[in-house]
């Protein structure tokens, strides 16, 4: 191992050493800027949730518990050497696939998706969530062992790595998660430098295939969502109700907002799913444009730190993994905000760290734990 | 070289990655900028629009219906009040599963197809969205409990309390009071925009009787409130409220004890009784039999209930008191007054009655009732005896001497041929024929042979029981005519009764009789009842005297009256009703009539009785009239207490 690193003549110039000033945090393997941004987000999120859930203290306590667990999980994962992920990528990926198999066999169906595992002694969870890390991890490992940009054969392998878990998740009838897993893999491949020609070709293919999807594959509710996106008023009390009420809430919030706990739309239950997927509408109504900008700013802070970690990772595995995780995170946040404000068709995605839901939070924090592991387990190079 | 290549390769890879990260960063920047711009558009540029939409979501103006004014009788007895009932209502917008909910309800409470049908009609009429529409009225406590248990399965359904009209005496005075019922489309269309606004919160409107006539007084002014409602239509708080102005409480001239006594006196017979206070024209009682329970109509009568009411064939909803009939001999005193007024006769004028009358130069006889008894006639007879003996021949002659047009003009003075009642717009005008009238209405000239029948009220002339009572009251009141009226006054917020003084409006009062003329007719009418048999002279007793004598109960107050018997088909029947009617099918039997009054100096009551197919006026209608006068003039009578036998009901 040492010999391999030593064989890099100009390694010093490219591999930044960990800062010696942040010794306490360094030894705790915690990244203070990221930690601080996440804490602010989670705190703001709890405030909004308190209002969105109709001042339900129990809900907020449960969410706070999930956040605490999330931070503990994050800290725990940050202790793991990034090399463990590199070496264990295949094993974990295989393990993840086996869990998906178990779900298919004995999983529990919730909201139409047979995606949940109720194992004795553990809280129920969705193994498919882990694929959002396991797929980028394996891709990052595989691509970092190849020379970049990836060759066509490499892409084929990557495609298979993405396709297997995606197919298993689709079998669970969980289209949303499958798409997110695919996106998390695509981000890694994009960062690895796949030629733009291929990217455009892929986009072109998707565009060409979409009419066929619309005619042969798309289910009624999916079509409805898209039609509703283009014209919410085609069914204002049915399919269009959510987005209409959500926009009313956002728009009526104005610059300053109606004040915490004072959103008429939110408090009088005009916003469906107001404490989960549509919680942004509550935030926007009660805190106005200022609140939205604060939220976006906090996300940007997390994003900036993630970019920094990706840029300064010690090797290509770390770079690709960090880049993939942080882009996936942004994707989540953006898609949710865009759909709630009516810029995109409605897809069932929570607003990261704000929407109610322990699974979502813990999964996110696992990602940030891996980022911190990448940031804080850099090898000290010989001088 | 190999190392150099490897180095370049490594650098190149980092370069590739970094470039891709920068591209990603630019993308993110663009996306976030677009998102923020969109948010600025929604929250700043379109803020006013969405604020209005938000207010529209939560703020609802709703109407608060005023409480309907109460109706009291002259003694402060409540004739119509309001009581709370519990209704099952539906807000269609939030009733997401209407059909499923209705199926569930059908098994949980009494809910007929009729109810659902009526609900759908109401729903289709509704103008304001998100308002609740009644589905079932008057839920029982069990039903309310049953709905509460299933409430989670019944989105959009609620149990709401409502004040509705209630008539505690049910059938008593039903026709006079009328009833309220659901506002229908025609009524809505007839309203002005202001009226429509005033009825936004109201479900019912007066349909007949007092309830209709005084709808404006009784209804009150609608109130408004602005409420904040949540997504499920529940009112979270009231933000602003304009209280409704309740309808005025009103007092009628009606005496509910007398009304009840009159209904009892009429019994199960079809007919009408109207009693009037001669001094004021106030209607003390107005009875029409058979009756009905007006409470049935308040929340919408069902088709089966309506069919039950009509099945009898006796038209219980029809107000016989204000329907016109041939009045028979009850008209004779007024023809006599006409003769005196025009100088056609004097009190001393004597007509010879051989038992019939013939027009000059004609052979056709017009028979006196005596002809059917013994072909004897009355012999020489003056006005007084002609009235108390109800002599036809005298009045045949008088009518012919007067001529139809003079009779017409004179009878108008007493309120015939017009609806003289001040506040009973539904009343029939009756018919007072004249030459012009006949040409206009039948397209024929007046034949001389028709005039004699008008003298005895068995021609074209028609009058309502109300008109007969008012005319009798005019005689009782010594010739001072007061128009009939129902309303006595309104009750203010302080409980003070404010008399509503209605000035008489009748136009034709020029032909007023002199006091002496009235006194003669009045005392002749007293003789109708009180003049006993005269051993010396045959046929010198009052026509109703035998009935009074046979009753075995002497009168305890002075009473005047006049009987009448109207032919339904052309039988020659005596005016005292002595001919045996029992062989005739009931529908062809004569109508029995009687007008009567308290004949004391200051007369307190006049009454007209009409018994449909009842038989003779003297034998059938007179006892009814007497019972009514007894009930009013003899305060210690047990009838006084028996009124309370008609106990107010709180359920029906």
Image (cartoon, rainbow, N blue to C red):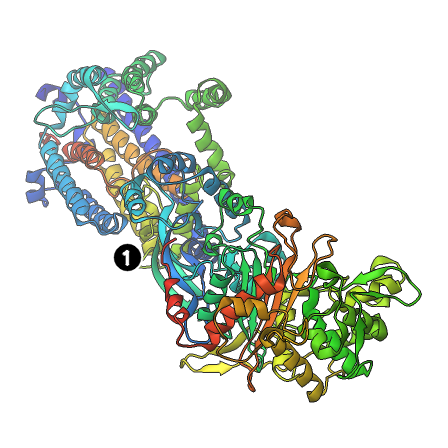
Above or below B649: residue A382:
above
Where is residue B398? Give x, y as percent. Answer: 80, 74
Is A276 left, or right, of B231 in this rendering?
left
For residue A27, which quarter of the picture?
top left
**Chain letter of the residue carrying label 1:** A
Closer to the camera in the image, B396 or B542? B542
Residue farthest toward the top in the current orientation of the protein: A153
Callout 1: few (<14), some (14-19), or many (20+) C-alpha neighbours within 10 Å? some
Closer to the camera in the image, B588 or B157? B588
For residue A31, which quarter of the picture?
top left
Closer to the camera in the image, B12 or A306? A306
Closer to the camera in the image, B573 or B124? B573
Looking at the image, which residue is at 69% across and 74% down? Answer: B387
Looking at the image, which residue is at 61% across and 67% down? Answer: B594
Above or below A37: residue A320:
above
Where is residue B282? Give x, y as percent. Answer: 56, 76
Q: Which residue is mark 1?
A: A260
Where is residue B515? Give x, y as percent. Answer: 68, 88
Residue farthest toward the front in the current orientation of the protein: B536
Where disc 1 sits, the SS reads loop
Is B101 left, or right, of B368 in this rendering?
left
Residue farthest toward the right in the current orientation of the protein: B361
Above or below A168: residue B204:
below
Query: Residue B210: in sight, yes or no?
Result: no
């Amino acid at each position: 191992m040492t010999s391999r690193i030593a064989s890099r003549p100009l390694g010093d110039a490219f591999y930044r050493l960990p800062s010696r000033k942040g010794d306490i945090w360094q030894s705790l393997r915690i990244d203070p800027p990221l930690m601080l941004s996440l804490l602010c987000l989670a705190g703001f999120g709890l405030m909004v949730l308190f209002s969105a859930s109709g001042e339900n203290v129990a809900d907020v306590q449960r969410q706070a518990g999930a956040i605490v667990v999330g931070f503990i999980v994050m800290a725990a994962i940050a202790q793991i050497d990034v090399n463990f992920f590199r070496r264990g990528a295949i094993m974990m990926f295989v393990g993840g696939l086996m869990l998906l198999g178990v779900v298919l066999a004995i999983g529990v169906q919730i909201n139409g998706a047979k995606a949940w595992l109720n194992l004795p002694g553990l809280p129920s969870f969705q193994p498919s969530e882990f694929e959002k890390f396991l797929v980028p991890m394996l891709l990052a490992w595989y691509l970092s062992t190849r020379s970049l940009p990836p060759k066509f054969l490499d892409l084929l392998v990557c495609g298979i790595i993405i396709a297997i878990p995606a197919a298993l998740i689709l079998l669970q009838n969980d289209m949303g998660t499958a798409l997110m897993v695919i996106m998390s893999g695509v981000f890694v491949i994009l960062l690895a430098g796949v030629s733009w020609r291929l990217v455009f070709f892929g986009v072109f293919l998707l565009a060409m295939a979409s009419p066929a999807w619309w005619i042969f594959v798309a289910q009624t509710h999916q079509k409805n969502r898209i039609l509703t996106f283009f014209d919410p008023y085609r069914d204002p009390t049915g399919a269009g109700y959510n987005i209409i009420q959500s926009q009313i809430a956002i728009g009526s919030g104005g610059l300053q907002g109606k004040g915490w706990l004072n959103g008429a739309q939110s408090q009088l239950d005009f916003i469906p799913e107001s404490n989960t997927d549509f919680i942004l509408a509550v935030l926007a109504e009660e805190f106005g444009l200022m609140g939205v900008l604060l939220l976006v700013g906090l996300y940007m802070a997390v994003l900036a730190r993630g970019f920094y970690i990706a840029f300064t990772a010690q090797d290509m595995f770390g770079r690709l993994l960090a880049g993939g995780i942080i882009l996936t995170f942004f994707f989540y946040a953006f898609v949710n905000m865009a759909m709630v404000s009516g810029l995109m068709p409605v897809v069932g995605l929570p607003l990261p760290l704000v929407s109610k839901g322990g699974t979502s939070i813990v999964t996110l924090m696992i990602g940030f734990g891996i980022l911190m592991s990448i940031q804080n387990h850099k090898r000290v190079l010989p001088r | 070289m190999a190392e150099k290549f490897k180095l370049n390769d490594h650098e190149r890879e980092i370069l590739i990655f970094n470039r891709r990260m920068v591209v990603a960063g630019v993308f993110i920047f663009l996306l976030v900028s677009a998102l923020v711009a969109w948010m600025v558009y929604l929250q700043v540029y379109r803020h006013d629009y969405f604020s209005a939409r938000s207010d529209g979501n939560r703020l609802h103006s709703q109407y608060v219906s005023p409480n309907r004014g109460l109706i009291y009788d002259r003694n402060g007895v409540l004739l119509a009040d309001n009581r709370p009932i519990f209704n099952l209502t539906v807000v269609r917008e939030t009733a997401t599963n209407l059909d499923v909910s209705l199926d569930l309800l059908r098994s949980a409470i009494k809910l007929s197809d009729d109810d659902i049908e009526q609900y759908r009609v109401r729903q289709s009429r509704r103008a304001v969205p998100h308002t609740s529409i009644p589905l079932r009225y008057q839920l029982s406590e069990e039903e309310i409990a049953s709905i509460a248990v299933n409430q989670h399965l019944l989105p959009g359904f609620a149990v709401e309390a409502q004040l509705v009209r209630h008539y505690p005496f049910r059938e008593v005075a039903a026709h006079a009071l009328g009833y309220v019922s659901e506002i229908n489309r025609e009524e809505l269309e007839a309203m002005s925009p202001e009226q429509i606004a005033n009825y936004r919160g109201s479900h019912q409107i007066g349909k007949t009787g007092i309830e209709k006539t005084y709808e404006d007084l009784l209804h009150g002014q609608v109130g408004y409130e602005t409420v904040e409602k949540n997504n499920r239509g529940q009112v979270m708080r009231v933000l602003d409220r304009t209280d409704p102005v309740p309808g005025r409480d009103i007092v009628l001239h009606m005496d509910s004890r007398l009304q009840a006594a009159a209904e009892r006196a009429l019994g199960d017979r079809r007919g009408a009784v109207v009693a009037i206070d001669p001094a004021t024209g106030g209607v003390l009682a107005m009875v029409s039999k058979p009756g009905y329970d007006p409470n049935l109509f308040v929340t919408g009568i069902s088709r089966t209930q309506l069919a039950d009411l009509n099945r009898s064939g006796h038209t219980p909803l029809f107000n016989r008191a204000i329907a016109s009939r041939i009045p028979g001999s009850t008209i004779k005193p007024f023809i006599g007054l006409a003769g005196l007024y025009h100088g056609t006769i004097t009190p001393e004028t004597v007509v010879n009655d051989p038992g019939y009358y013939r027009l000059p130069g004609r052979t056709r006889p017009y028979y006196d009732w005596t002809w059917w008894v013994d072909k004897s006639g009355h012999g020489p007879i003056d006005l007084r005896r002609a009235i108390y003996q109800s002599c036809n021949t005298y009045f045949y002659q008088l009518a012919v001497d007067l001529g139809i047009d003079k009779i017409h003009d004179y009878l108008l003075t007493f309120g015939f041929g017009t609806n003289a009642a001040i506040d009973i717009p539904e009343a029939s005008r009756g018919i007072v024929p004249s030459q012009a009238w006949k040409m206009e209405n039948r397209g024929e000239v007046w034949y001389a042979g028709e005039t004699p029948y008008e003298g005895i009220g068995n021609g074209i002339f028609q009058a309502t029981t109300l008109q007969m009572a008012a005319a009798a009251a005019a005689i009782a009141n010594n010739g001072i005519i007061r128009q009939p009226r129902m309303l006595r006054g309104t009750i203010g917020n302080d409980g003070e009764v404010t008399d509503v003084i209605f000035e008489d409006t009748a136009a034709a009062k020029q032909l007023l009789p002199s006091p002496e003329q009235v006194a003669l007719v009045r005392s002749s009418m007293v003789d109708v009842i009180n003049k006993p048999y005269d051993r010396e002279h045959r046929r010198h007793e009052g026509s109703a005297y035998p009935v009074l004598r046979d009753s075995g109960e002497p009168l305890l107050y002075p009473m005047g009256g006049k009987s009448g018997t109207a032919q339904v088909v052309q039988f020659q029947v005596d005016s005292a009703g002595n001919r045996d009617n029992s062989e005739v099918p009931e529908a062809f039997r004569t109508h029995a009539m009687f007008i009567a009054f308290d004949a004391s100096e200051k007369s307190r009551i006049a009454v007209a009785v009409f018994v449909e197919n009842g038989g003779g006026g003297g034998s059938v209608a007179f006892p009814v009239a007497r019972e009514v006068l007894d009930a009013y003039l003899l305060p210690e009578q047990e009838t006084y207490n028996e009124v309370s036998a008609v106990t107010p009901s709180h359920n029906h």
